[in-house]
Amino acid sequence: MSQSVDRFSSRVENYVKYRPGYPTAIVQLLQEECGLTADSIIADIGSGTGKLSEIFLANGNHVFGIEPNAGMRAAGETVLNRYSRFTSIEGTAEDTRLPDSTVDLITAGQAFHWFDPARAKAEAARVVTDGGWAALIWNDRKLQSSPFLEDYEALLLKYGTDYQDVRHDKAEAAIAEFFAPEVAKLEIFPNQQIFDFEGLCGRVLSSSYTPEPNQPSFRPMIEELELVFKKHQDEGRVVFDYDTKVFYALVPRQKTV
């Protein structure tokens, strides 16, 4: 756990600047499907720099941001300090530090793949109210939607330090067990970012699986990234397309692993 907690410590600034936010359509989906209201209390697990928490705070919700990494947590507190209904907590998916039956909705944005699924399931059952829901959310970069993204994926496969081991799509296999015996539904929303070369570099460096500046492969990676950018740029910009995936279901009432 400590390794996964610490791996973003040097990425915080780039994460704040260059990671995508989340479509506000997620709020409407959860209103229609999960009974979300402005009075619902939310635990955003792995809240990081606050990108997912913010769409619920803007909806009027009280959000407990549960984040184990000190740098990410501090950045989230800074970004969200204008929201009086945000409470920052040093905790994990497996130990949120919340009292029993505290929240109506558990969310996790770009985070569930770092959880211990069985222990997180037990903790979710403990802290959620009866009839409470969970929503596991990812901005899933499209790997083959454009020649640029195909070349970008090839670059990550070449230079990523442990890219294939930590890709979040591997976590989707654990989602069914996390929600069992409930069956999760899936809704997908389009999402997009547009970058100049500086922004593209920042986006690359926000990922925990890319080389850092003190590593030998860093400079070759940036040089190749520049070639990819020049090949595909249009008026000095490239486009990242995402599918924002929302897996949601009731949290099972049995409080067992």
Image (spheres, grey):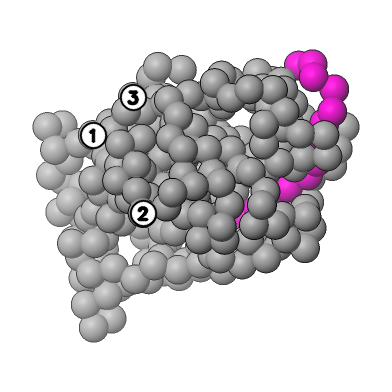
Position of residue 170 relative to residue 16, above or below, is: above
Q: Earlier in the sequence, mark 2 or mark 3?
A: 3
- Which x, y percent locates residue 73? 36, 35
**Dot label at residue 119:** none
Q: Which residue is located at x 79 percent, y 16 percent? A: 256
Give the magenta-colored segment's residue range: 245-257
Residue receiving disc 3? 6
- Image quarter (top left, top right, bottom left or bottom right) of the C terminus: top right
Q: Are marks 3 and 1 in contact (CB under 8 Å)?
A: no
Q: Secondary structure at mark 2?
A: loop
Mark 1, residues whose alpha carbon is within 10 Å: few (<14), some, or many (≥20)? some
C-alpha separation, residue under disc 3 versus residue under disc 1? 9 Å
Instruction: Decide whether residue 250 is among the magenta residues.
Output: yes
Q: Nearer the viewer, residue 154 or 163?
A: 163
Relative side of 78 to 150, left or right: left
Label 2 sits on what residue type? Answer: Arg
Q: Which residue is located at x 23 percent, y 46 percent? A: 13
Q: Which residue is located at x 14 percent, y 38 percent? A: 213
Mark 3, residues whose alpha carbon is within 10 Å: few (<14), some, or many (≥20)? some
C-alpha separation, residue under disc 1 versus residue under disc 2? 25 Å
Residue receiving disc 2? 82
Residue receiving disc 1? 10
Label 1 sits on what residue type? Answer: Ser
- Which x, y percent locates residue 231? 25, 71
Q: Nearer the viewer, residue 158 or 193?
A: 193
